[in-house]
Amino acid sequence: MIKITNLQASIDEKPILRGINLEIKAGEVHAIMGPNGSGKSTLASVLAGRDHFNVTGGSVEFMGKDLLEMSPEDRAREGVFLAFQYPVEIPGVSTTNFIKTAVNETRKYRGLEPLDAVNFLKMMKEKMKLVNIDQSLLSRSLNEGFSGGEKKRNEIFQMAMLEPKLAILDETDSGLDIDALRIVANGVNEYRSKDNAFLVVTHYQRLLDYIVPDFVHVLYNGRIVRSGGKELALELEEKGYDFIKNEFAVTEEA
Amino acid sequence: MTDAIQKINDRYQSSEALHDLKEHAIADFRKLGVPTVKHEEWKYTRVGSLLQNVLEVQAPDQVKPEDIAALKLPGDAYEIFVINGKFSTAFAPEGMIVSSLGTEAKGQYKEIIEKHLGTSSRYHQDGINAMNTAFADHGLFIFINRGKKIDKPVYIYYINDNRQFPTLSLPRALVYVSAAAEVEITEHYISLGSNDSFTNQVTEFVVEQDAIVNYYKIQNEGPNASQVSTTQFTQIGKSLTNATTISLSGNIIRNNLNMVMEAEHGESHMYGLYLLDGKTHVDNHTIVDNVMPNCFSNELYKGIMDGESTGVFNGKIFVRQDAQKTNAYQSNKNVLLTDTASVNTKPQLEIFADDVKCSHGCTIGKLDEEALFYLRARGIGERSAKSLLLHAFAVDILDNIKSEPLREYVDKLISERLEFNF
């Protein structure tokens, strides 16, 4: 589904990603773990098209197309979804109106008729159950005054509405208590299928108890330094990131 | 410039009733003249040359109903037409009198007019206000009876018929709202042609105890229409006023809005939205003068500036020595869409009392990049995302338009401009 080859990116001339190689196939869940500052969120942002990062090398192929050539909106319409670490509050834009616009612009791009009010509401009702989100929340301004948990649930709700092929969850677990975490993870698991894929960016193993990955990658200093199965996450949790740092420092010198 | 008065005078027949006021105003005009940019309050807004262009005043064409049909405000209303500054038809629906100042100044309302006409000149020591005052007798007088809630909104259409010639209009109005009365009044400015026009307008509201006034000003004229528009509310009794100013197009627009809170426990809200493009210049000068204690005022002005447009916001809050327990808030926020648009904003507080709550602030910025990215990351195109954000920015002001038809009308104008169609 997505093939990332030697991806390099920098901000203000400072390299953050130093050659990422990663391939994700349909039906797979990949977790990216790593210490703070390792480049996890940068990778998520670069894939979604945030323009304050400079891509300085490498390529990203998504469903056979050059992802890096596309505007953020076209990436979303093609089926890339980024659940934000810090969802933005936008006063004056109702959540429902926003999602309707997003859904219909995406449908238009895919050559589908816009959803009428009845079908849109039907779809909303169905997806709302997925993350246990309340109608009253959706009639409010987008994320304005939402709690941390409400914001993250809203992200997963949007994901369910937009039906992406690849969902990138950027530290979706941060700031969530265990109940909210369960709800969010449940929403993800419900959506998970053989046709879509997930890239779960997280600092902690905790989330991966609920969203069980097929592969775990450790990002350090802008590179994937270790890859393995879900047991790698447990190992990291046990030993902490220091062991990666030490090991990697040694390898680097050798 | 003195012969300006003469030129205008030749076109007006004065009534005896306001003769003294006229003499004073002409003397003031001779002394003060038209303000130049050296005048602190006119630093960014140049009006002298505009006036020069329109002095060869011509008689208006006959304005026919179909000429303005498309420009009418929505819904059933009491309509007042002021064409090139001249008000013509008096009428008196239940609870209200609409007449001319010249007529009423020698009749039943003589005392009220003598006492209240011209009080705004205290706040505007400039020749512009004096010039208008000199020809006040052709102006409009509206009186709302005690305890009356006027059943329909009052729409005042200021029509510049500049199809054949440049026009100079000097509309004047005094609105007296008696105790416990309630009225909604909208001033709507329209130009029919594309010749230069200059409107020098003054409206004075006097609001008695327990009265409620909802006031709207909608400026949506052609690119060659300029105006200096002064609106003053004097709350002589504890009352509630809401004033909303919407500026959408024109050449050079200067608005002076004064709230004079002369009674305890008065409340006033002032909202403004300027949505500018091209070379339009809009200057909003506001004054809240807290004379008595325990008054509340809130002010929010927002601007969206595109093209080479320029904006000015100058908000003054005075809290006089006796005006303890005043609550006065003021905020001005601007979004610049181009590098060639600009805005000068100057909030000012002058407080002489010691137990008050006042705040003021202003922001000038571009569209929030993070919000824009968030919308685009959901598949919303860049143009749609921008218009969604700009509309959301403006909605704050629209939400304060209490009249639903009017709110929808203004929303439609703004949505069209922002290509907002969600």
Image (tube, coloured by chain):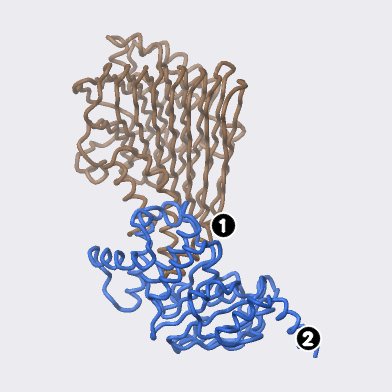
Q: Disc number at residue B339? A: 1
In the image, residue A125 lies at what x, y percent? 29, 64
Q: Which of B281 and B134 is in front in this view?
A: B281
Q: Which amino acid lies under the numbered mark 2 shown in the image of this protein?
A: Val
Q: Split into 4 quadrants, where in the image is the C terminus of chain A?
A: bottom right
Chain letter of the residue beneath label 2 in the structure image: A
Which chain has been coloured blue in this picture? A
Q: Mark 1 lies on which chain?
A: B
Mark 2 nearby-residue class (10 Å; few <14, some 14–19, many ≥20) = few
Q: In which quarter of the image is residue A238?
A: bottom right
Q: The disc labelled 1 sits on which kind of residue?
A: Asp
Label 1 secondary element: loop
Pinpoint residue B122: horizontal percent, then vertical percent.
51, 19
Q: Which of A179 and B336 is in front in this view?
A: A179
Q: The brown chain is which one?
A: B
Residue at figure coordinates x 35%, y 76% from the top left: A109
Q: Mark 2 points at which residue?
A: A250
The residue that appears at 19% across and 39% down in the rendered structure is B65
* Drawn side of residue B162 relative to residue A1, left or right: left
- Where does residue A122 sit, x and y in percent of width and height? 26, 66
Above or below for B24 versus A70: above
Residue at x-position 49% and y-position 63%:
B372
Q: Could you say whether the residue bearing mark 2 is in a helix, strand or loop?
A: helix
